[in-house]
Image (spheres, helix red, strand yellow):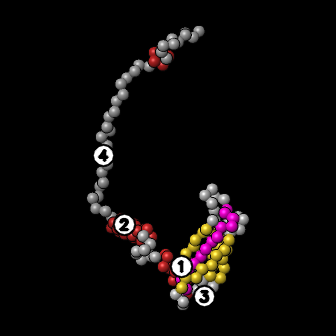
Amino acid sequence: MAEAVSESGDYLDEVVEETPLLFASSGAVLTIEDPHLHPIGRAIAIFLIFVSMLGFLNGLDYASPDDGLVRPDEFVYRLAQTAPEETATFRGTVFDHEGAGLANATVYISWLNTTSNMWVSTENLTEDDGSFEIQRLNPGLVRVDIIA
């Protein structure tokens, strides 16, 4: 029948002869036959570099909204300047540090009235779930304070 395998060694160790590991390079060399790039390939490469640079510059433009060609805050502010008065609605939800809605918090909104050059304000209390809505505001830049 079968012979008992000794506990100190494995059966494969006895049958297979151990050889040292070898590493050898194949000597294969990658060569490019034509040193000149095809004109269409060159045009595509230049186009890709150009588009990549435009994307990079566009990203820089959005990364610093106070400088550059695109200023999203000014775009929104210009839309607000042309909107009719008392057409804005400000709504949201106030949460506490644990993420629960904060009831009876005061949402205080103030803005500069351009005709009288004075600060005007309004306030509202939040509902039980922390939600609030203030209607008939003048569109534009406002300061929001939340007092809990």
Marker disc for residue 49:
2
Quadrant assignment for the N terminus: top right
Q: Nearer the viewer, residue 104 or 95?
A: 104
| Distance Cα–Cα, label 2 vs label 1 | 40 Å
Q: What element does badge 1 sit on?
A: loop
Q: Residues within 10 Å of mark 1 (few under 14, many from 20)?
A: some
Q: Earlier in the sequence, mark 3 or mark 4?
A: 4
Report x, y in % for residue 87: 63, 84
Q: Residue furthest left?
A: 35
Question: Marks 3 and 4, how far apart in space?
Answer: 73 Å
Query: What are the residue bounds of the magenta stretch?
Result: 101-113
Q: Which residue is mark 4?
A: 29
The mark closer to the camera, 2 or 3, is 3
Q: Mark 4 or mark 2, which has the lower sequence index?
A: 4
* Callout 2 amino acid: Ile
Q: Quadrant of residue 84?
A: bottom right
For label 3, the crowd category at 10 Å Cα-Cα, with few meaning under 14, some 14 to 19 and many 20 or more, is few
The residue pinned by badge 3 equals 84
Q: Residue at x 51, y 13 (%)?
A: 7
Q: Secondary structure at mark 4?
A: loop
Residue 42 seen anywhere in this rendered image of the structure: yes
